[in-house]
Image (tube, grey):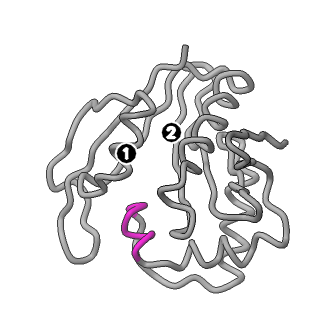
Amino acid sequence: MKFTANSKGDSVTLRAPVKMDFSVLSTLRNDTAIQRQLMIKPQQYSPAQVRAWIRRRTRDACGVFLVVDCGGPCGFVQLTRVDRKAGTADLGICLARSVRGKGVAAKAMGLLELHAKKKLRCKKLTLRVLRVNHRAIALYRKLKFKILEIKRRHHFDGAHWRDVVFMEKALR
């Protein structure tokens, strides 16, 4: 499975993870700032735990886990809780700091949406994001995600209670 988007000479590909991606995925998985943004408990994961996480994500029958590649691995996208009967899925993206703000996220999200619509027959994608993550919310709004709800003090990040924004996008 491989999907590519090109524009202005920049290419973004979504593909299944391979052995050479481990270093990048491990770095992302162990970055405490990213862990807080993804609303997971900040902790350090051993190489064996990272391998087990990749294995779980890639074998999930109700999900899709793909590496984002733009001249090398630079992050991942995922669909979780894919409900083929209802036509829904939860979307997630995580990119290395070095590629943020360069259009990679928008291209990767576009490819993932296309896959969700054509291959998984999704009619709607949902996501949740911390309210303080203004750049991500701006991207999602640009990509036509609508805010459904803001839950106040919904997530405890280990130091603070954070508001969480729930968003959705209908796929046409």
Label 2: which secondary element? strand
Q: Which residues are magenta?
A: 33-39
- From the image, tell me which residue sits under label 2: 90
Mark positioned earlier in the residue sequence (2 or 1): 2
The quadrant of the image that shows the C terminus is top right
Q: Does the magenta run of residues contain 157?
A: no
- From the image, tell me which residue sits under label 1: 128
**Foreground of the two, 165 or 132:** 132
Residue 20 appears at what percent x and percent y? 83, 72
Drawn side of residue 124 relative to residue 48, left or right: left
Residue 119 appears at what percent x and percent y? 74, 25
Numbered mark located on residue 1 in the image: none
Label 1: which secondary element? strand
Residues at badges 2 and 1 in contact (C-beta under 8 Å)?
yes
Q: Residue at x 76, y 61 (%)?
A: 71
- Examine the residues drawn in magenta and state their main secondary structure: helix
